[in-house]
Every structure is written in C-alpha cells, then in structure tokens.
Image (spheres, helix red, strand yellow):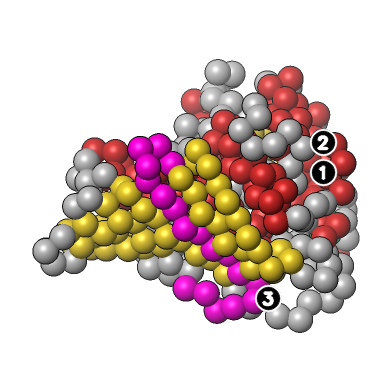
Amino acid sequence: MGHPLPAESPIGWGILATGKIAQDFARNLREVPDAAIVAVGSRRSEAAAAFASEYGGRPHASYDALVGDPDVDVVYVASPHALHLEHARLALEAGKHVLCEKPLAMTVVEAEQMIGLARQHDRFLMEAMWTACHPVIRAVVDGLASGRFGTARQVHADLGFVVPERPPGDRLVDPALGAGALLDMGIYPLTVADLVLGPAEELRATADVGPEGYDLDVAIVGRHAGGAVSALTASMTSASPRTATIATDTGRLDLPADFHHPTHAVWTPIGGAPERVEGLGPVLGTGLGNEAAEVGRCLRAGLRESPLVPHEQTLRIMRQMDEIRAQIGVRYSADGAGRPGYGAT
Ligand SMILES: NC(=O)c1ccc[n+]([C@@H]2O[C@H](COP(=O)([O-])OP(=O)(O)OC[C@H]3O[C@@H](n4cnc5c(N)ncnc54)[C@H](OP(=O)(O)O)[C@@H]3O)[C@@H](O)[C@H]2O)c1
C-alpha cells in the first residue's frame, strides 16, 4: 500500500507510443470517468502531434520527455513486447505508475525485473490484461466461484486471425519485437483457463513454427487442480473461432467471439434452456476502459498491484509461456537472460 492519488483532478494518463492499441486505448479512455489523457510520447514528433490533436494531451517527441511530464500520473506502455521492460523501466525510474501492454515482457525473468523495479520505486504496475478486468469475464468467474454454474471441468478457448502481409520490421512478423501467436494471442486462452480452472499443473504444446523461427499456430493442452483440463489454441494463419467454452458438471458456458472481451456469455444448464449472462456492471468502450478504470481505482486506493491482475498471476502465465516456447522450440534474444523453466520457482 502506498500513498493514494488525491481525488481533486482526474487520473492523468501519459500514452507511450502511438500505434494501434494506443489509439484503441485512447478512444476507450473517453468512456472512463475520472481519467484524462494529459500527454503522449512518440519517437516521431509528427506522430505525437497527430495523436494529441485527435485524443488530447501534450505531445512529446520522445519517451523520455513523456515520462518527465509532471502532469502524468500513470504511463500506459503500448510499444511492442520486446521493448516493454525498457519502457516500463523508464517510467518507473521517473516515478510514474505503469500500465503495461500484454505480454508484460518477453520472459518471466524480464517480468520479474519489471516487478522488482515497481517495488523498488514504490509504484503501481499492472499488465494490461483487460480480459481479467472485463465485466462479463468477471461475472463468469464469480458465478463459477459461487457454484451458480457448477464446477468447471473443461475449458476450450481460441484466439486467432489471418495476419495479412506486413512490411518487414512490423511487430507481428519481426521476431526481434516478439512476433509469434503464443505471446500475441495465446496469452488470452491461457489466462482464461487460469482464471476459470486455477493454475495449470501440467501443460503440453505443439506448434507450427515458421521459417522466421516464431510460432504461426500453437495448440496447448493443460491439466489443472482436481483433474480439470484445458484445450487452447492461437493462430496467425486462420480465421479461427475466437470463442471459449467452459464445460461444467451442471452445464455449459459459451463466450462468443471475441471471447476475451465478450458482449455477454450464455449459460446452458444440462436439460435446460440457454440463459444470457450479463456483465458485472457496464462495459466501458470495448472493455479497455474497464482496465483503465481498474488502474484508477487502485491508484485512488494507494494499491501497488491490482487484485484483478495480481503480479503472481502475470508471472505464472509468463512462466507457462516460457515453458511452452521451450516445448515448441521458439527462442527470442531475451531468452539469453536465462530461462528458469515452468514450475521451477
Ligand atoms: N490489449 C489488446 O487487445 C492488444 C491489442 C493489440 C496489441 N496489444 C499489445 O500492445 C503492444 C503494441 O501493439 P500494437 O498492435 O499497438 O503495435 P503497433 O501498431 O506496431 O504500435 C507499436 C508502437 O510502438 C512504438 N515503438 C517503439 N519502438 C518501436 C520499434 N522499435 N518498432 C516498432 N514500434 C515501436 C511505435 O510508436 P511511436 O512511433 O509513436 O513511438 C509504434 O507505433 C504489443 O505488446 C501488443 O501485444 C494489445
């Protein structure tokens, strides 16, 4: 617990990078009470200016200038995964709180370093795992915890899309920036299985690894506490279903596409009619607003991590992804820092 942010002005957001998700997030922030974009930083001054004229805030022509802006309370790191540690470090060392895009880092070693920096500087840090903050997912998780939907025995979840032709150097196709289906999309099925079934006790994976050395398609099976199982896929090459199904001993929950930020869920009890499951409260924007609201709530309360996306959960999923990559033979330069292995810590 640290000092809570005083309530007299909205939470001041500084947006680090001006790419696709930064723009989605900025649009979502319009729906969030008690939040304002006060600054944006880009490597390119014209991109910062264009972003600021569209979404507001003071434009900065470098990330250094952004994190030095005194009006910024919290920095949203929206650069490619391979740069998350460097950019979160910049913000934390400047005394800013951080919401960092998923995956938090390339490896569990990097993620531990980032969490260590947040503790050292006594600042809030959260991975932008918006699924865990989403009202419909929270309703499903709560309903399972209370027994309303019975006991979950199986999770099937998938996320994928056909990645169109991209220029060289684009993060989706450049292994130096963290390209690969697992880190980009597989993190969501893994997270939902973890939220619903608890930590995986065993994971096995297979993948189609492309010529550049990263996974184009990956399939993962897991065993969880009490013998529950998960079957999870991610794809960069197919129009995959993007849905999730949770089978319980009393019925089935369906999360329609896109399951990681669904409009609703459907509960079908055995022998009964389907029922619509609504979220716990409104969805803000596309759901990115709910993660921003959760950050604001935590900052107002003086928290240094969110109970919805605790550091241990983020580290567990990072550890799982390290282990899956070891199984499928995908290595990034960040692995040079050493890979402790799934379950080793
Ligand atoms: N939550 C979600 O649903 C979601 C969706 C998509 C992506 N993401 C995550 O968000 C992160 C960014 O994804 P994105 O799709 O927004 O990527 P993007 O469109 O390629 O944008 C990335 C931005 O990062 C900045 N950047 C800094 N150094 C860079 C470098 N060496 N190469 C390329 N860009 C660099 C650039 O901003 P400037 O030029 O302005 O500095 C660039 O516009 C990824 O980690 C991804 O996993 C999350």
Q: Determine which residue is flagged by label 2.
A: 338
| Lower position in the chain sequence, tag 1 or tag 3 | 3
Residue type at mark 2? Gly
The secondary element bearing badge 2 is classed as: loop
Side (left or right) of 120 relative to 200: right
Residue type at mark 3? Val
Q: Between residues 242 and 22, which one lies in front from this camera angle?
A: 242
- C-alpha distance separating marks 1 and 3: 25 Å
**Rendered location of residue 313, percent (x, y):** 54, 36
**Rendered location of residue 241, percent (x, y):** 47, 73
Q: Is residue 46 above or below residue 141?
A: below
Q: Between residues 263 and 243, which one lies in front from this camera angle?
A: 243
Magenta highlight range: 224-241
Q: Determine which residue is flagged by label 3.
A: 163
Callout 1–callout 2 Cβ contact below 8 Å: yes
Q: In what quadrant does ligand 1 lie?
A: bottom right
**Rendered location of residue 307, percent (x, y):** 47, 32
Residue type at mark 1? Asp
Q: Between residues 174 and 327, which one lies in front from this camera angle?
A: 327
**Which class describes the residues within 10 Å of circle 2: few (<14), some (14-19), or many (20+)?**
few
Residue with the most extreme bottom position: 165
Q: Determine which residue is flagged by label 1.
A: 335
Q: Residue at x 81, y 63 (%)?
A: 213
Q: Between residues 188 and 67, which one lies in front from this camera angle?
A: 188
The secondary element bearing badge 3 is classed as: loop
| Residue 78 visible at all | no
